[in-house]
């Protein structure tokens, strides 16, 4: 009997409950609750479920004590450590850009190239958040708090304003800021999913009812030749002007070339489906694996989420204000609302513009016009990340 009791005692002592119910397990309990909340948001509320479900489940796995899924007590490498390799070396975000390119139709952008400016203006929030993140340390120090960010961390936080999760992850890892990856990824994907809630009030604040009712003329047809030449020319120009942007912009355009050239349908479909889906699973699990209690449960996590919101708000505002300028310069032919779609949450931001427009005038169709700045925002965020890398490497 004593042997059985000893075995039972050893089993209990080596179970995860022994850690969870100790003082050391408080953080794990909190993070398990965070994982469950994220799963609820993703599944129950539909907030970016394709990424938030893997991220949340990765968070759940890594916070189960003694599992060894990252590494065990002897330091042996676990499964998630191998999965994390692809995020650590920026492999997953680049492959996801390949899939995004294969899914993206740049026709609306080519039909109205001036909307490139709206995609650029919507990066305004990135630089506002960058400046704000650099101010956090000195301001917090006056209150006796140590929650400052170095310049590389500030850049990683700022890129959340582009509303592009893969770019946020790519830049964070490229700048060597793995410790804040979980907070940045959760903030980036959460705000992407909250576009329909965050953007309409900002749009209405910066536009009048008359502005929102402006109708735009039909877009011109875009030839197949233009669609094939665009990714090639864009890659060359971006690569020569800003070499650091080549991994993201180059793979985005390669995916788009597979889509548009007409000779690689099988590759295009693979990039859009199997490759993109598999990489999304591994990227989500890798990000979730960084959300261990000792790294995530810090005051700076809340500050990162707040700064991400600041970045997103100013990015939306920058796009709308640039739209107002273009409205004046074109004699009222541009509806300024389409500038808000300059963030790269494709196609959600464009759909928000369409919804707000039809609330004012049910016969007003702006979706395709908004898709121009929307896909320009994908390029704009990648270029903004390239600028950060060039200046901080």
Image: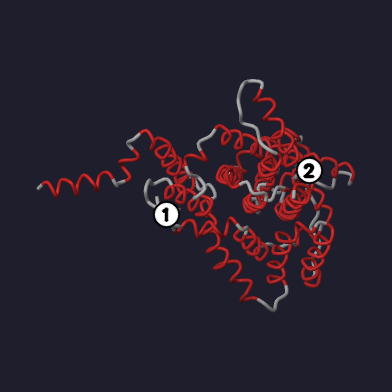
Would you say the residues marked 1 and 2 are in contact, meaning their CB atoms lie under 8 Å apart? no
State the colouring used for the structure image. Answer: secondary structure
Q: Nearer the viewer, residue 67 or 54?
A: 67
* Distance between mark 1 and mark 2 Cα atoms: 50 Å
* Residue lying at the far bottom of the rendered structure: 263
Crowding near the residue tagged with mark 2, few <14, some 14–19, many ≥20 C-alpha atoms within 10 Å = many
> Which residue is denoted by mark 1 in the rendering?
69
Quick check: 380 left or right of 66? right
Q: Which percent across, then down, holds residue 117?
A: 82, 49
Location of residue 161 with respect to 253 vertically, above or below: above
Horizontal placement of 101 versus 331: left or right? left
Q: Secondary structure at mark 2?
A: helix
Crowd around label 1: few <14 · some 14–19 · many ≥20 (10 Å): many
Considering the numbered disc 1 on the image, is that residue within a helix, a strand or a loop? Answer: loop
Q: Quadrant of residue 108?
A: bottom right
Q: Position of residue 383 (x, y in %)?
A: 76, 53
Residue on which disc 2 sits: 336
Question: Which one is nearer the viewer's eye here, 232 or 32?
Answer: 32
Looking at marks 1 and 2 on the same chain, the residue that comes earlier in the sequence is marked by 1
Relative to 298, does residue 178 appear above or below in the rendering?
Answer: below
Residue shown at 63%/58% (left/top)? 90
- Write the residue at 54% across / 63% down: 277
Q: Nearer the viewer, residue 70 or 256?
A: 70
Q: Which mark is residue 135?
A: none
229 left or right of 201 in image: right
Count of numbered badges drawn on the protein: 2
Q: Please provide percent x and percent y for residue 200.
A: 66, 39
The residue at 64%/76% (across/down) is 265
């Amino acid at each position: 009997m004593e042997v059985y009791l000893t075995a039972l005692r050893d089993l209990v002592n080596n179970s995860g409950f022994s850690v969870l119910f100790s003082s050391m397990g408080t953080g794990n309990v909190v993070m398990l609750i965070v994982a469950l909340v994220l799963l609820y948001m993703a599944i129950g509320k539909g907030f970016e479920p394709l990424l938030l479900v893997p991220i949340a489940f990765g968070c759940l796995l890594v916070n189960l004590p003694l599992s060894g899924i990252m590494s065990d007590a002897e330091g042996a490498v676990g499964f998630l450590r191998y999965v994390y390799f692809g995020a650590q070396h920026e492999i997953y975000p680049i492959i996801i850009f390949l899939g995004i390119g294969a899914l993206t139709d740049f026709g609306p952008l080519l039909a109205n190239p001036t909307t490139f400016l709206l995609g650029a203006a919507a990066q305004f929030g990135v630089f506002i958040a960058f400046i704000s993140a650099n101010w956090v340390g000195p301001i917090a120090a006056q209150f006796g708090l140590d929650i400052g960010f170095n310049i590389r961390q500030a850049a990683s936080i700022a890129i959340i304003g582009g509303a592009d999760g893969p770019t946020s992850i790519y830049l964070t890892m490229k700048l060597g800021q793995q410790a804040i990856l979980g907070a940045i990824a959760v903030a980036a994907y959460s705000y992407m999913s909250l576009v329909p809630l965050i953007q309409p009030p900002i749009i209405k604040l910066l536009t009048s009812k008359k502005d929102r009712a402006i109708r735009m003329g039909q877009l011109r047809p875009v030839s197949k030749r233009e669609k094939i030449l665009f990714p090639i020319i864009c890659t060359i120009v971006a690569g020569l002007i800003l070499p650091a942007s080549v991994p993201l912009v180059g793979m985005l355009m390669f995916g788009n070339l597979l889509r548009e050239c007409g000779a690689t349908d099988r590759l295009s479909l693979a990039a859009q489906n199997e490759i993109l889906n598999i990489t999304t699973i591994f990227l989500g699990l890798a990000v979730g694996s960084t959300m261990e209690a000792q790294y995530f449960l810090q005051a700076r996590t809340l500050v990162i989420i707040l700064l991400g919101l600041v970045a997103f708000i100013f990015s939306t505002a920058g796009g709308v204000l640039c739209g107002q300028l273009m409205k004046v310069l074109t004699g009222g032919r541009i509806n300024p609302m389409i500038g808000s779609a300059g963030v790269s949450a494709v196609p959600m931001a464009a759909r928000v513009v369409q919804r707000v427009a039809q609330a004012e005038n049910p016969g007003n169709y702006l979706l395709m016009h908004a898709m121009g700045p929307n896909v320009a925002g994908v390029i704009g965020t990648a270029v903004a990340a390239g600028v950060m890398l060039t200046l901080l490497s």
